[in-house]
Amino acid sequence: MGGHAAPASTGRAHRYAIIGNGAIATELRSLARAHPALDLVGIVTRPGSAAPAGAAALTLAEAIDRADTVVEAAGVAAVAEHGPAVIQAGRTLLVSSVGAFAHAEHRAGVLDAGPGRALITSGAIGGLDLIAAAGRTGGLDRVTLTTTKHPRSLVQPGMPEPERARILGATQATELFSGSVEDAIARFPASLNVAVALGLAAGDLGLVRVRLSADPAATQTEHRIEAVGAAGSYRFLVRNEPLPEHPSSSGLTARSLLSELLRLAGQGTMLA
């Protein structure tokens, strides 16, 4: 998650495929059209689902065969289902649903496996290089993430009706959860990928404590990050605009995916 020099250009467009056809995938496709260094070879959709106009529908095997990089934009379950095959085939997997790596088996099968490689995005927050430098050298004792979102962005698929009603019925800022990264992802898998990104950066998910609040007055998604230890004390505040049609997702996620694709295509440098 640190800075990387851009790869040398190969003289052709960087071929990429996207797993998923939701709001983040749609935004990424829209943004990427302005960049001739990128070539979308197709979309891996659910069986029986059509690809969007202008894009080819691919099986995962076809995406692996045709693409240099496979972008995951379909949720935590998609990382577990498709990630190992991409890595085993020697391709690059660009992951947006970082929450998948709250589970040790997914880290082993994707993040720590080969011969391919997994790259994770951190489009919703910043400061991860600092957290990594301090945490992986024993310089942090704890990291606290306090996230506040509008209630409608926190309703999860399959959520019990009483909990759904409690969230949507909030009339003021209401704390919904306080606990570990693993428990946070189990309860809110679509809303707290940033917690796992922090834990991975720090080198220990157990260092991170998560608090989540629903606030009907919130117009942006807010992440407050505090880290304390021998290396120092740090505080970050990030407020992101959510995607208009998918408020549980940060509008910056697609831009983060695009930035990484452009780096892989040899377009520019990410500073350390």
Image (cartoon, helix red, strand yellow):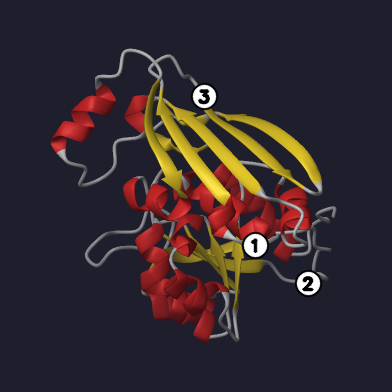
Q: Which residue was labeled with disc 1?
A: 203
Is 108 situated above or below 37? below
Characterize the local packing of mark 1: few (<14), some (14-19) or many (20 or more) Cα atoms within 10 angstroms: some
Q: Which mark is residue 44?
A: none
In this view of the protein, can residue 36 be seen by the observer? no
Q: Does label 2 or label 3 sit earlier along the sequence?
A: 2
Query: Dot 2: what SS?
Result: loop
Residue 108: x, y in percent?
50, 77
* Front residue of this view, candidates 149 and 208: 208
Q: What is the spatial separation of the Cα atoms under label 1 and label 2, in whole angstroms?
A: 37 Å
Disc 2 marks which amino acid? Gly
Badge 2 crowding class, 10 Å Cα cut-off, few under 14, some 14 to 19, many 20 or more, is: few
Residue underneath mark 3: 220
Q: Residues within 10 Å of mark 3 (few under 14, many from 20)?
A: some
Spatial CA distance of label 3 from label 1 is: 29 Å
Work out which quarter of the rendered image holds the N terminus and state it: bottom right
Q: Amino acid at mark 3?
A: Gln
Q: Is residue 133 left or right of residue 197?
A: right
Task: Find residue 155 and report its horizontal and vertical position in percent.
Answer: 29, 36
Q: Residue type at mark 1?
A: Gly
Say whether disc 1 or disc 2 marks the residue closer to the N-terminus.
2
Tell me which numbered mark, 3 or 1, is placed earlier along the sequence.
Answer: 1
Q: Residue at x 45, y 49 (%)?
A: 180
Camera-side mark, 3 or 1: 1
Residue at 43% x, 75% y is 105
Mark-to-mark CA distance, 2 and 3? 40 Å
Q: Are marks 1 and 2 in contact (CB under 8 Å)?
A: no
Q: Residue furthest left?
A: 161
